[in-house]
Amino acid sequence: MSDVIPAEEWVFADRYRVDAPIGTGGMGAVWSGYDRHLDRRVAIKLMRNTPGPAATFGSAERAAFNEAAEADRERFLREIRTTARLELPGIPAVYDFGVEDSTGRIYLVMQLVYGQTLEDLIASRNYGADPWPITWAAAITAQVAATLVDVHRVDVVHRDIKPSNLMVTDGGVVKVLDFGVAILRGASALPRLTQVGLTVGSPPYMPPEQALGNPVGPASDVYALGCVLYEALTGRVPFVETTSRSYQDHHVNTPAPWARAWRADVPSDLENLIARMLAKRPADRPTAEDVYETLLPIAAQPGHAGPGGNRDPRRPFLRPLAPAPRQRGAAPAPKPTSATSAPLSIDEAIEIQQRVGDLVQDSQFQQAIDLLDEAVGRASAEPALKLEMQVALASTLWFADEFSRVAAVLDEILPKVDGGDDLTVLYYYSGVSHAEIGNIDEAVKQLTEFLVLAEPYDPLHRDATYRLGMMLPAVGRTSEGLQHLEALRPVLVAEYGPDSVHVSTLDRRIAQIRRGPDLLRNSGNGKAASDDVDRRRD
């Protein structure tokens, strides 16, 4: 059995298929998966059940630990509901949560986001020669601060702000990850005896009060964010642990270092902001809103080139609400997968196509498309096998109504497909897809090719004839369009009768074209065919 197709699917809540692990942590694991009801990719967090310290079974201590664990679970669920209601752009959307019946584990179903973590972005940069722009670091920090403002207003504290929990996604939006995990790990601002030994937060970014086990609050997140801003500017954390001095010691006792010691172009107002964010006393720190307002003028500066592109965190400030740049027909970001990247075998290809057929039958198009996207990539060394997978991909995309991708895939592969039924129907798919996305000239070309190859009794022949007849006037070929529509009339009369709605509608279209073909130029894709003529895709 292929690694791509599990021998036995893991589905829980009769809805969510767990696919491949994305990451693990002290409190559980995050998996990619699918919502089978809505046919979309999701991220699924399965929280690990953590036993309390050893205690005599049935003892008062054991009962106390069990009671505390249950209280933590209930508070986690309440705070997840609170976070979900916020619907913030800076937090992955929460879709569902609950308790898995068989194990009692809490699960959280969230938006699956694609991007790069700040940790990876910092590690990829040579700060000695070419650091990230100051505007870039300010934009990331400002976005996180804006998210924290809204979160703090509902009394939720993240407790684990760090670069690996910040992801720069498409459109330049920064997502703050692992709210649920952080809340569960520090389920109360005031530690209890039952939380002895529980480490909350990450030492390089941990505020003094958190390091000492004292109550935490919004100011604790601001301190951690100050550490993140320092690192985004300089490529290093504010404090370095040594054999003689721990992170905890530094956070509690060492004055905040100056970023200018590592980067001379840090402006004084930004340097002062970092110093305030890293104040030892929570009361001396700015609020998250203060941080945002201070950074906003810097983040919104058009400046010297940084990473640019669709994932530039300055984009929301420089071009708010702008549509994301998109390459025509480009595939979406691939889902995380644990499948092998070894070349695709013929047996696997057959197995995948069988699996895809089942998924399409169940209207699980996204899963089918993901399987085929991966198969195409793995078949790159075998042109014939790759072409077979691309044909299957184009057909699956067609059934999913993803017309832009259908057109893009078929533009690439149609010249490579030999004759036969596959080629004929692919011309139809291509023509209709181009029509649906407004590429009328290409649609006319592809549907014309289809009509040359298709037999008159082909169930798609009538639909293609109608669509072509409607589109030709829009490209200045009115007489040809009328010829197609008039040739279609006796076919409809024979099948439906002269007084049928199909015939009367066709007559009305013909009359419109004769009165003025320009009336059709704004609707030249012939989309009315789907209303007036059966659209058959099998």
Image: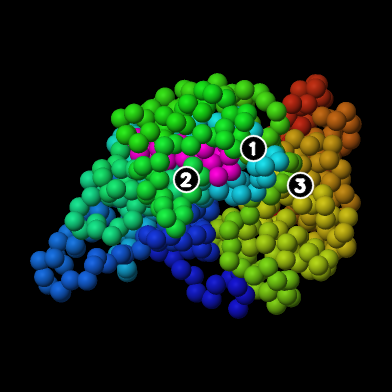
| Range covered by the magenta-colored residues | 218-236
Contact check, label 1 and label 2, Cβ < 8 Å: no
In the picture of the structure, the residue carrying the numbered disc 2 is: 239
530 and 10: which is toward the camera: 10
Amino acid at dot 2: Phe
Please state if 72 lies on the left or on the right of 13 as rendered. left
In the picture of the structure, the residue carrying the numbered disc 3 is: 407
Amino acid at dot 1: Trp
Residue 5 appears at what percent x and percent y? 58, 71
Q: Which residue, as the protein is rendered here, is positioned at the far left?
A: 60
Q: Which of marks 1 and 2 is in front?
A: 2
| Label of residue 132 in the image | 1
Residue at 24% from the left image edge and 58% from the top image edge: 196
What is the distance, in whole Å, between disc 1 and disc 3 at their CAs? 38 Å
| Label of residue 272 in the image | none
Q: Reading the chain from its start, which is encountered first: label 1 or label 2?
A: 1
